[in-house]
Every structure is written in C-alpha cells, then in structure tokens.
Image (cartoon, rainbow, N blue to C red):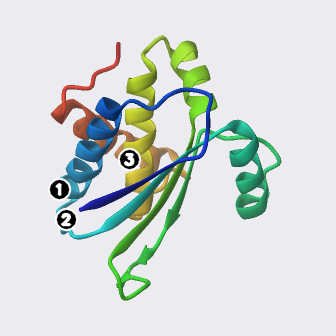
Amino acid sequence: MELEIDNRQNIRKIEDELIKILEKLVKASLDYEGWEEDYEVSLSFVDNEEIHGLNKAYRGKDCPTDVLSFPMVDDQGPVLEEKILGDIVISVEKAIEQAEEYGHSFEREMAFLTVHSMFHLMGYDHMDEEEAKEMRTKEEAVLQQLGIKRE
C-alpha cells in the first residue's frame, strides 16, 4: 500500500506522527474489507478555499466541506492499469472546526475523515439511513482497531 501525501495548506503543521497514524488507517481499512494492499491512495491536505472550489466544481455545491473522495475503482476493479484506489482531499480548516465542535482532538477528526473517505473509495455511501449505519459501523471498527476512540 502506498500513500501519497500532498500538503497544500499552511493552517496547521501536519506532524509525522499523524501521517503514520493515517497510513495505518488506510491499510487497516483495506484489510477490514479484504482488499489487496497493493493499492495507491493520494491524501491531500487543503484549506477551506481550495476544498470549496473542488466541491463546487465536482459536486455543484457552493460551500466548503470537510472531505472529498475521488474513487478510481468501480465494480470491475481499478479504472486505470495501475492499482490506484483514489484521492482523498481533507480540509484541515474544517477538521479543526469539527474537532472543536465535537469535543475531540484534531488527530481524531483527521483519522475519522480519512477512514470515512477510504470507505467511499471502496464503494460505500451514505445516501440513506441503512447505508449510513453500515458505513459508520465499519468506520468505527477500523478506528477502534487502532485504539482511536471518541473522546
């Protein structure tokens, strides 16, 4: 499993320790679903302005969001010859805001957003209540495997 990191924000320093945790979570998400580990995942850290532009361009929503997922696999497997699972884009600004709002650490919020997006990359969604519940159960299982609990 290869995790490509692209830090395009200067709101908050992203510590090496956090990167290591996020790498473990990406791998644990793949393992949990029984996916092979030879996929590449891109993880970008941006500010609200950049994610706002991406959200508007790709989803038609004229507002910033916390995380966007761009899958590169479909029901038949990888779209490209290389095994690229997809791209995750996290607004560090939103993660800081949400960590405060939910009363937990920045690191826990970044971990949750990464796992949440990994399940999107693997084909899960939360368009209805049943899908949302299934996805949330899987996310919490992966987070707890690595000892990341709600604070």
The quarter of the rendered structure image containing the C terminus is top left
CB under 8 Å between discs 2 and 3: no
Position of 32 compared to 135: left or right?
Answer: left
Residue 124 can be seen, yes or no: no
CB under 8 Å between discs 2 and 1: yes
The quarter of the rendered structure image containing the N terminus is bottom left
According to the picture, the residue beneath numbered tag 1 turns out to be 31
Residue 126 can be seen, yes or no: yes
> Which secondary structure lies at badge 3?
helix
State the mark number for residue 37: 2
Asked which quadrant contains residue 35, the reply is: bottom left
Residue positioned 28% across, 69% down in the render: 39
| Viewer-nearest of discs 2 and 1 | 2
According to the picture, the residue beneath numbered tag 3 turns out to be 135
Report the amino acid beneath label 1. Asp
> Which secondary structure lies at badge 1?
helix
In the rendered image, the vertical position of residue 92 relative to residue 67, given as above or below: above
Report the amino acid beneath label 3. Met
In the rendered image, the vertical position of residue 92 relative to residue 60, given as above or below: above
Instruction: Return the residue found at the far right.
Output: 62
Nearest to the observer: residue 127 or residue 144: 144
Q: Position of residue 55 (x, y in %)?
A: 72, 53
N-terminal label among 2 and 1: 1
Residue positioned 55% across, 29% down in the render: 95
Q: Position of residue 11 (x, y in %)?
A: 62, 28
Asked which quadrant contains residue 80, the reply is: bottom left
In the rendered image, the vertical position of residue 25 relative to residue 42, given as above or below: above
